[in-house]
Image (cartoon, grey):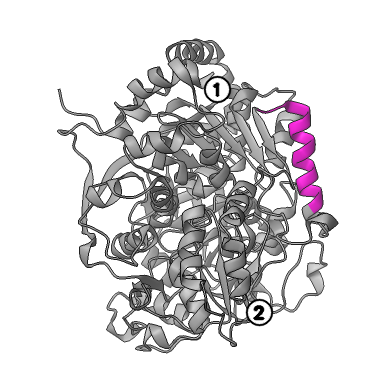
Amino acid sequence: MNPFRIVTGLVAPLDRANVDTDAIIPKQFLKSIKRSGFGPNLFDEWRYLDRGEPGMDNSHRPENPNFVLNLPRYRGAEILLARRNFGCGSSREHAPWALLDFGFRALIAPSYADIFFNNCFKNGLLPIVLPENALDALFDAANVHPGFALTIDLERQTVATPDGAMQWRFELEAFRKHCLLNGLDEIALTLGHADAIRDFESRRLHEQPWLA
Amino acid sequence: MAGRTLYDKLWESHVVRCEADGTALLYIDRHLVHEVTSPQAFEGLRLAGRKPWRIESIVATADHNTPTKDWAQGIRDPISRIQVETLDANIAATGAKAYFPFRDRRQGIVHVIGPEQGATLPGMTVVCGDSHTSTHGAFGALAFGIGTSEVEHVLATQCLITRKAKSMLVRAEGRLPAGVTAKDLVLAVIGRIGTAGGSGFAIEFAGAAIRALSMEGRMTVCNMAIEAGARAGMVAVDDTTFDYLRGRPFAPMGELWDKAMAYWRTLRSDPEATFDRVVDVDVSSLRPQVTWGTSPEMVVAVDGRVPDPDNERDPTRREGMARALQYMGLTPNTLIAEIAIDKVFIGSCTNSRIEDLRAAAEVARGRHVAPNVRLAMVVPGSGLVKAQAEREGLDRVFRDAGFDWREPGCSMCLAMNDDRLEPGERCASTSNRNFEGRQGAGGRTHLVSPAMAAAAAIAGHFVDIRRLV
C-alpha cells in the first residue's frame, strides 16, 4: 500500500446521500479475479448511457453528459465530495478499488457505511469525515469555482484550500493514521503478535473443544 | 458490577490483545468463503508467501455467480466460470473444513448453508466477505461482513484488527399479526431508524416478538441489520436455538453438546445491562411492508401510499425521494396496492429457507400467476432446502401455479448470473436491497415478505396478504 501524506487535488461534488456500493461498481464487474482495472467502470450505470459488461472497450462507450464526473471541469479529480452514508450496502472492496483506480485519493463526506469505511483504509484511500455544514460549504465552492482544489494533510489532519482561506480539521483513529502515513502491511503487523494469537487459540480450543 | 450485553460477552471472549486507543485484535472462529470476494485474498496470500492460519475455520461454497437452471451445461458465462473455478483451485490448494462446490447437493447461499450445516454456532465470531454475514448473529454469534483485504487478513492471521462498536437494543414486543412476518418487522425497523441508523452499532434484537420467532425468522431479521447500517445483528440463545442446532452435521454431539449448551446458555444480555441506544417497537399493530424507493428505508405498509417528496423538509432527503420516484417510475400518493409488477423473485439469503418457501407456497396453492407477470421464480437457498421442499411437494405447488422452480444460489438478489431484471421491469422481491440497478440495470425492486411476493405474483400487483390468510 502506498503511503498517504499530503494530497492536493481537484475536487468533484457527488451530491447524493446513501450512495451504495452497487452504484459505485455494479455487480457484473465483480466477476474479475483481479484487484485492478475497475476505474473505467466506476459508477458505470450513471456514467454511461449503454449497459456495461466486463471486457468491453470502455473508451468508445457513450457517456452520460449530465453525470458530474463527466463534466470537463471535474475531469482528473482526486478528491470526491459526497453526502451522508456513502458506501452503504455490499461489502465489496471493489468499490474502493474502483475509486482509486479512477484516480481518487480521498473522499470527504459527513458519514460512511462501516464496511466501506474500513475497506478504504486497507487500500490507502482516505475517507475524511467533516460535519454537514463544512460539506455544504465545500459543495458550494466546488459548484461555483471551476478548478476548485483542496490540500489534505494527513499528518496535521487538515483539509484546506491551497490559499489557506478555508480550513477544517478532521478526526482519525491513531492506528489508522499510522498505517496510512507509513503504507504499512497490516498482516505483517498482526503476525508480529503470532505468539499471542497461538496462546489465545490453544486456550480457546481447550475451553471450548466443540470449536476444534 | 454492571451487567454485560450479549455483544460485550461475545466481544470480550475473542479479544487477543487491545491497544490503548481501543484498536483490538479479534480472534475469528468461523470464516465463510465464496467465489466473489476471495480470489484477490488468496492471491495476496500466495504473493506474500503466507499460508492460511487455521484451515479448519474455513467453510466455502460457490453461490453468487452460479446459474439457477440447466446445471448439466455448467456455467456458460466464461468470466463467471473462471471465478468459480478459481475458488475450486484455491480450496484444493489450501484446504477447508468443508467445501460445497457448484452442483454439490449441499451447495447453496453461504448464509443459508452455514447454519444448515451447524457450522455456525453460538458464541462464535463468524466473518465472510459479504455484508449479509450479520445473518449468523441469530445464533448468539458475533457475525459481520468484511472486505477482501480483511478476508486475506483472517486467512493469514485468524484475526481481525477492529474496534468495538456501540450497542443498540431493538426491543420488539407484542405478537405479530397473522400474515405479518420477520421480514415485515425488520423492514419496519429500518424504516424507523434509517439505513444509517445502525452505523457504528451492533444491534441486539430482543423482546417477546423476537423470542417467538423461529431460527429462520431470526436469521431474516439479523440478515437485514446491515440494511440499517449495523455490521452485526444478534439474538440471545434460547431453546429455539438449541432445537435448531441439535443433530446438524457440524454441531457437537453427546458430552460435547452438553458442555457446549451449558456455555451457550450464558449468551444473553444480563438483565441490568445497558445499551448506548434502545429502540422500542410494538409489533402487534404492524402491517405487511413494501418498499417504494431505492433504499430499504423507503418503506410503507401495504395499505399505504407512495409518499410525496413535497412533504419532506430536509432538502437532501427530498431530492433523494424525488430521484427514487423517478427511477422507480412512481407517482406520489399512488396506492401501493395499485402498483402492477412484471417479475417476482422468491429467494436470497434473507428469504429462501424452507419456512419462506412454505409461506409462499401456501399462497400459491391452487392459484395461478397473473398474465401480466412475465416471470415468477423461486430459488431455494440451498440444495438441501430444495430437496426438503420437493419432499413436501412445494415444487409442484409452485410449478402448477406457474412459478419457475430453480436451482439454489444468490440469483436475482444481486443478478450476477443470468437472472436479472431488464430496464424498467418492476419486481416484487424477497431479497434485501432495492438499490438502483441491484437486480439488473434499470430494474425496479420492491422488497416484501415471501407470502407478499407470492400474493403479488398471483394478483399481478401488490395485495394485502392479510386478506388472503
Tell whether position B157 is magenta: no
Identified by mark 1, the residue type is: Thr
**Secondary structure, magenta segment, majority class:** helix
Identified by mark 2, the residue type is: Asn
What's the CA distance linking mark 1 and mark 2?
45 Å
B80 relative position to B123: left or right: right
Secondary structure at badge 1 equals helix
Q: Is the residue under label 2 in contact with that under label 1 (CB below 8 Å)?
A: no
- B82 or B326: nearer the eye? B82
Residue identifier under label 1 = A190
The residue drawn where x is 21% and y is 63% is B284
Residue identifier under label 2 = A64
N-term-proximal mark, 1 vs 2 = 2
Secondary structure at badge 2 equals loop
Q: Which residues are magenta?
A: B81-96
Quadrant hosting residue B241: top left
- Which label was assigned to residue B317? none
Does residue B300 appear in the picture of this structure? yes
Place of residue A74 in the rendered image (x, y in percent of width and height, measured from the top left): 60, 69
Place of residue A53 in the rendered image (x, y in percent of width and height, measured from the top left): 76, 66
